[in-house]
């Protein structure tokens, strides 16, 4: 290679380095703070039912200094949703709970459901964030190696359950009636660390249905829309939820890929869900059945991987409508 050729290669490498630096600066300084509200319509209610709005929040990874995120989430109370669903990873720092309490301060009186992600138990660990691109940070196939919890999960649960009145769906079932439609809801603790107990769901749901059949009939309610809630959307969990009759499944965890390529999409999902279902609304099909699946790209990142690219932080307002609505 001659001198002129060497200069061209050097110029190209310099241009690529500059573009990479600019991309990282945009993703770390700008895009990760461009909080966005998405809206989706889901035709999942019984014929003739009144519409229901669900505010889906996930992966706030809250740190105490993130005042802009706290204020933006607090402003979502103005939407006056009928139901809030929080799919976990609320905390990003040992002192993150006061920020969550400020962010959700105006949500009292709105029914809610929640499950945990690993970052509701364990604080983030300092590591090379590029490892995220090599595959999931956990297999999701069994209990994670013993690790001391260093976040105040009890305080988080007390705030959600007692102060806000939300239902804890970590390996649990529940129900809520909104606008004349009864929702049977069920969830599991985080599959990413093997905390889910899918083996318990059948018995819990059978008991719930036995207890509620007469009550629902006596009340004249339109029975039933089933909602499954999970943090990490591993395929085995989604398949189990479909087997248990879910009409709608809500999940988070993926960050939408967090670093995406325009025109291509997510590079990784941090679990085994297909890349084309890493965020947004889709259909999950299993065993000749299907359910609507909404995966939130979430509102935060680890404090040790503070970058998003082509994947803005988001919350979603889902409007559930009757199946016969065009």
Image (tube, rainbow, N blue to C red):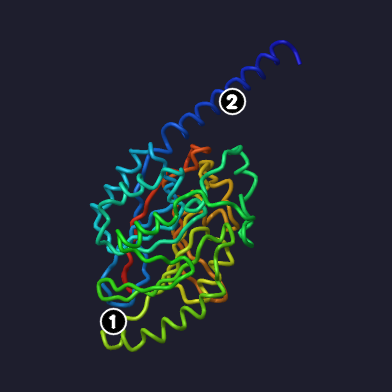
Q: Secondary structure at mark 1?
A: loop
Dot 1 or dot 2: first in sequence order is 2
- Image quadrant in which you'd find residue 49: bottom left
View extreme (right): residue: 1
- Specify the quadrant that holds the N terminus: top right
**Viewer-proximal residue among 271 and 208:** 208
- Give neighbour class at mark 1: few <14, some 14-19, many 20+ (Cα, 10 Å): some
Q: Residue at x 33, y 66 (%)?
A: 320
Q: Quadrant of the C terminus?
A: bottom left
Element marked by disc 2: helix
Per the image, the residue denoted by label 1 is 221
- Callout 2 crowding tier (Cα within 10 Å): few <14, some 14–19, many ≥20: few
Q: Which residue is mark 2?
A: 16
Q: Position of residue 158 (x, y in %)?
A: 36, 59
**Based on the displayed image, in which of its 4 quarters is residue 219 positioned?**
bottom left
Q: Residue at x 50, y 63 (%)?
A: 189
In the drawing, does residue 175 fall left or right of residue 131?
left
Nearer the camera: disc 1 or disc 2:
1
**Quarter of the rendering containing residue 236:** bottom right
The answer to whether 136 appears left or right of 111 in the picture is: right
Question: Where in the figure is residue 292, as x and y percent of width and height?
Answer: 45, 66
Residue shown at 56% from the left, 53% from the top: 275
Horizontal and vertical percent position of residue 11:
62, 17
Q: How many marks?
A: 2
Q: Is residue 162 above or below residue 264?
A: below
Give the residue displayed 28% in from the left and 81% down from the top.
221
Q: CA separation, marks 1 and 2?
A: 61 Å
156 is higher (above) or lower (below) than 24: below
x, y percentage for residue 5?
70, 15
Vertical relation: 47 (above or below) 77: below
């Amino acid at each position: 290679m001659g001198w002129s050729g060497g200069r061209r290669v050097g110029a190209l490498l310099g241009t690529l380095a500059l573009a990479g630096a600019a991309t990282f600066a945009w993703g770390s300084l700008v895009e990760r703070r461009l909080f966005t509200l998405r809206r989706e319509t889901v035709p999942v209610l019984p014929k003739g039912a009144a519409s229901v709005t669900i505010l889906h929040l996930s992966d706030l990874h809250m740190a105490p200094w993130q005042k802009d995120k706290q204020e933006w989430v607090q402003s979502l109370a103005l939407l006056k949703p009928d139901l809030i669903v929080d799919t976990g990873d609320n905390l990003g720092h040992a002192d993150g709970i006061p920020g969550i309490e400020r962010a959700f301060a105006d949500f009292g009186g709105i029914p809610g459901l929640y499950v945990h992600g690993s970052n509701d138990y364990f604080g983030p660990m300092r590591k090379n964030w590029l490892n995220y691109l090599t595959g999931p940070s956990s297999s999701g196939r069994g209990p994670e190696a013993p690790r001391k919890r260093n976040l105040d999960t009890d305080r988080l649960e007390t705030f959600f359950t007692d102060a806000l009145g939300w239902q804890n769906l970590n390996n649990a079932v529940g129900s809520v009636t909104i606008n004349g439609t009864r929702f049977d809801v069920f969830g599991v603790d985080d599959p990413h660390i093997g905390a889910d107990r899918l083996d318990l769901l059948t018995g819990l749901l059978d008991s719930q249905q036995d207890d509620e059949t007469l009550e629902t009939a006596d009340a004249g309610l339109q029975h039933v829309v089933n909602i499954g809630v999970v943090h990490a959307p591993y395929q085995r969990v989604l398949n189990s939820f479909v087997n248990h009759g879910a009409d709608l499944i809500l999940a988070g965890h993926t960050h939408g890929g967090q670093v995406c390529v325009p025109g291509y999409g997510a590079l990784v999902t941090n679990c085994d869900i297909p890349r084309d279902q890493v965020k947004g609304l889709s259909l999950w099909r299993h065993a000749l059945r299907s359910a609507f699946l909404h995966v939130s790209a979430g509102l935060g990142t680890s404090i040790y991987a503070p970058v998003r690219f082509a994947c803005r932080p988001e919350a979603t307002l889902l409007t559930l409508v009757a199946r016969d609505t065009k």
